[in-house]
Amino acid sequence: NAGVTQTPKFQVLKTGQSMTLQCAQDMNHNSMYWYRQDPGMGLRLIYYSASEGTTDKGEVPNGYNVSRLNKREFSLRLESAAPSQTSVYFCASSDATGAGELFFGEGSRLTVL
Amino acid sequence: GQQVMQIPQYQHVQEGEDFTTYCNSSTTLSNIQWYKQRPGGHPVFLIQLVKSGEVKKQKRLTFQFGEAKKNSSLHITATQTTDVGTYFCAGRRSGGYNKLIFGAGTRLAVHP
């Protein structure tokens, strides 16, 4: 039982390159989330998926797209990376739509040069 | 939009001293959660408070939810070096499906 698994753990990109962060959970949770964490700013919600088949914008969605591939998987795509997207990205899931604790993955550290 | 403010941003204590972090929301919350993140780690859920005026304890940790459901606090009694990390509050607004909005966190350093 791995919980929430994110890949890759580390990535370095050049400005303008694209990439996808993958996230999978094995807890049969309905809701999944992508957060970014920057020093002094806590965790800011990028996108979330309340249930399979739905996605919605969070606080800082610009420059990102998401796909809820199935109940287990929720990916985050950067189409044209910018230095401002250098951050640590966390995927999370919860078992109750709009409620319940979040289970976080170990994070993906992204550097955009 | 909804904002959750957390203070202090950073706190040094000597081992054995107490520590408190405070969380304030601009809107009434349906519930508030607290998470701990160890250095280099990921946030881990500690507790959820739902009722107005609720107080919950976990060993040396005491969590409170304000009467107006707009503020919360986490108090650690007699800190230990294992308490080191960043403590986040996260609030959810009332009504419908609402996202969890995190405070900026309080980073706790404990000196032996």
Image (cartoon, rainbow, N blue to C red):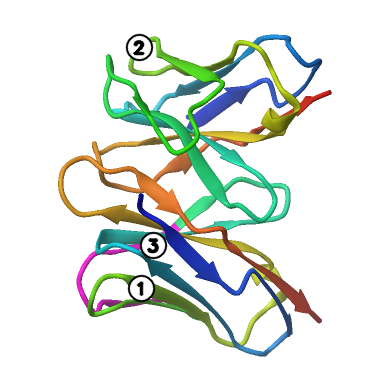
Q: Position of residue B38 (x, y in %)?
A: 66, 56
- The answer as to whether the residues below labels 2 and 1 share one chain is no
Q: In the rendered view, tell whether residue A68 sits above or below residue B41.
A: above
Amino acid under disc 1: Asn
Residue found at x 34% / y 61%: B32
Q: Which residues are magenta?
A: B46-58
Label 1: few (<14), some or many (≥20) within 10 Å? many
Sort mark 2 into few (<14), some (14-19) or many (20+) by Cα contacts within 10 Å. few
Which residue is labeled 2 in the image?
Answer: A70
For mark 3, name the chain. Answer: B
Label 3 residue SS: strand
* Residue at (80% x, 79% y) in the render: B111
- Amino acid type at circle 2 is Asn
Q: Earlier in the sequence, mark 1 or mark 3?
A: 3
Is B88 part of what is drawn in magenta? no
- Left or right: where A65 falls relative to A9: left
The residues tagged by marks 1 and 3 sit, at their Cα atoms, a distance apart of 15 Å
Q: Quadrant of residue A38?
A: top right
Residue type indicated by callout 3: Ile
Of labels 2 and 1, the one closer to you:
1
Foreground residue among B22 and A25:
B22
Residue depicted at 28% across the width and 19% down the height: A54
Residue B71's label in the rendered image is: 1
Q: Output the chain of dot 2.
A: A
In this view of the protein, can residue A2 be seen by the observer?
Answer: no
Magenta span: chief secondary structure: strand
Q: Which residue is mark 3?
A: B47
Query: Distance of mark 3 from mark 2, alpha carbons?
Result: 29 Å
The quarter of the picture where the C terminus of chain B appears is: bottom right
